[in-house]
Image: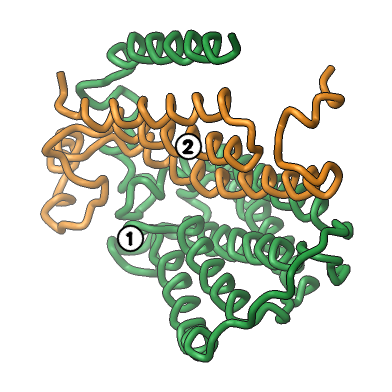
Amino acid sequence: MAGNELYVATGLIVILIGFATVLVKRNILKIVIGFSLIDSGTNLLIVALGYFPGRTAPIVNNPDMLANRATLLVNTARFVDPVPQALVLTAIVIGVGVTALMLAYVVRLYATGKTLDVRQFGRMKW
Amino acid sequence: MKQIISMIAIVTVGFVLWQLVPIAMPTALGPVTHHYVADGLKDNGGSNLVTSIVVNYRGFDTLGEVTVLFLSVSGAAFVLRRRSGLEVTEPVPASEIVQTGARALFAPIVVFGAYIFVHGHLTPGGGFQGGAVIASGVLLLLLADRDRSLPHGSLSWIESLSGLGFVLAGLAGLIVTGSFLANKGVLPLGQWNRVVSAGIIPIIYILIGLKVGSELSVLLDVMVHAAGDGEGN
């Protein structure tokens, strides 16, 4: 295997902790934290999948890397996968926005029900 | 009972993910990524290949992501804008140290954020990161002085104009080369590792930085002022 198992496993564990939090906890704030953990764990997992040990960041910052096409092709064996990084980069900021949206709903729910216990909002079930 | 079902669900999901991950685990760059890495510099002129992908190869995706961020932030602002009617204790004013420190640090933080998104095509960083840094400076300012309220009008103008600029930069590619968000052929790619290079990439990333920064700042302002009877913002 590639040698990035530790990061992949950490990502998986963080996702599962978040999943468990969402399922088990009753405090809405803790459920939001759980969703946030799923978000972070997914980001970590995606980046870890694109990481090849021993390789460097995908930035062409060395003049001898761009001498000709052959040296640019060497970069494909020198760089980690840039696509997962590009995906996660936007996902992190969107995660902040989505967490803010969830917290806004928590404020609204607390104002309506004066409680953070998710069981008290049973009448909203369908 | 519920706990047992939750346990079973978690173990199942964990098992499935654990089985799926080795399949997804690549050992070398895929064919598309190979093209991005080998030809990214020639196509876009930017040293940072992640930026080339975010803004150019997958620029349409980024336009969608910016829209998602806009929607979630405006959703949160909409939900929080009405008076919550909650009883809140009077906030303790920040100490002298925090107030002075925030005033001293705000300008460097904003400049640093601007540096991050202006150099997005050369060094690690870009519009999303720089915007988040700027918003953290705004958060510091709001924590130091709870009564401060941001100029929502001008911030939403900045935000709307940046979004419009992103679309217009894309349309320029559509008009000149016939493909949306095209970079090569629209503007000269310039010299390697210069700030003014890489065609439309820095322009778009600066616009994204302004957009993300103003969006997150408005979000923070709305959240800080949401407690209590609200000021109607």
Foreground residue, B98 or B135?
B98
Label 1 belongs to which residue? B122
Q: Amino acid at mark 1?
A: Leu
For the C terminus of chain B, the image quarter is bottom right
Tell whether A59 sits left or right of A86.
left
Disc nearest the viewer among 1 and 2: 2
- Picture disc at residue A37: 2
List x then y, in percent, for residue B209.
54, 62
Residue B34 appears anywhere in the view? no
Does B98 sit above or below residue A68? below
For the N terminus of chain B, the image quarter is top right
Residue plotted at (35% across, 54% down):
B45
Q: Secondary structure at mark 1?
A: loop
List x then y, in percent, for residue B114.
47, 72
The quarter of the picture where residue A89 lies is top left
Instruction: Classify mark 1: residues with Cα within 10 Å, few (<14), some (14-19) or many (20+).
Output: many
**Chain letter of disc 1 in the image:** B
Residue plotted at (61% across, 55% down):
B169
Colour applied to chain B: green
Q: Secondary structure at mark 2?
A: helix
The quarter of the picture where residue B179 lies is top right
Q: Amino acid at mark 2?
A: Leu
